[in-house]
Amino acid sequence: AQSVTQLDSHVSVSEGTPVLLRCNYSSSYSPSLFWYVQHPNKGLQLLLKYTSAATLVKGINGFEAEFKKSETSFHLTKPSAHMSDAAEYFCVVSFYNQGGKLIFGQGTELSVKP
Amino acid sequence: DGGITQSPKYLFRKEGQNVTLSCEQNLNHDAMYWYRQDPGQGLRLIYYSQIVNDFQKGDIAEGYSVSREKKESFPLTVTSAQKNPTAFYLCASTGRGNEKLFFGSGTQLSVL
């Protein structure tokens, strides 16, 4: 079965420290992978995407993610957290063999302490 | 400007009542999706449609119905069979290649 799992429901970091949000997927095929961010009372915004080009993907606001096929992972990182990064983050997988069906992870809430 | 419009923003349902959530897009996107968001459960796929007059069930389709008579429109009906309809509903669409998912602003459905 094809699925996506975000390993942490909540992550708390201090401002200025690194951020790591973990995502693993399960698939027999090479998927397209995305990270989205949802700020309180706002819609979803695309942070970055992987579509079989470079395995290290750079996104907006200093975020990046590395696709590791051997580990079936697509973890999201940022070197230095900012207070404005506090939000809900979703890892999303697209499987073309299922007609482009998009599957969302459960979400990770990121808290940033001053 | 192109985008996705969901209406209403807030909706209340009485017991035994069907309600319909509207989703319209002017992005010329082929694929449209309905997701349900519950606290701590992320977004779960209800239905999706890749082309006009065709749609597939997602992971939690029971108690819901959709139609796709026009490319621009993908309304979701929450039927009386859905016993726990209170949630935030998001409509989305993608262009060719599914490279970017555009979301509407969502509809909060509550039961009276």
Image (tube, coloured by chain):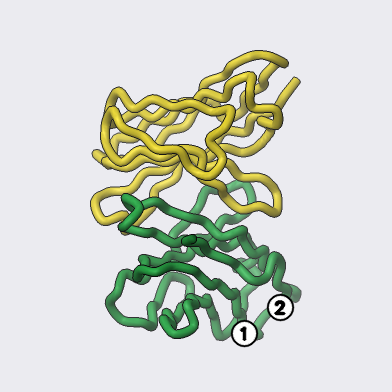
Name the colour assigned to chain B in the rendering: yellow
Q: Position of residue A58 (x, y in %)?
A: 40, 77
Say the numbered circle drawn on residue B103.
none
* Amino acid type, mark 1: Pro
Which residue sits at x=27%, y=42%? B29
Q: Position of residue B40 (x, y in %)?
A: 70, 54
- Chain letter, colour green in render: A
Task: State the image quarter where residue A86 is shown.
Answer: bottom right
Asked if residue A45 can be seen in this view, the reply is: yes
Assign a secondary structure to mark 2.
Answer: strand
Pointer 2 chain: A
* Amino acid type, mark 2: Val
Compared across the picture, whether B36 is left or right of B50 comes to right
Residues at marks 1 and 2 on the same chain: yes
Work out whether residue A78 or residue B44 is closer to the camera in this orientation and state it: B44
Pointer 1 chain: A
Residue B4, placed above or below residue A100: above
Q: Are marks 1 and 2 in contact (CB under 8 Å)?
A: yes
Compared across the picture, whether A44 is left or right of A9 comes to left
Residue A26, placed above or below residue A62: above
Name the residue that disc number 1 marks.
Answer: A18
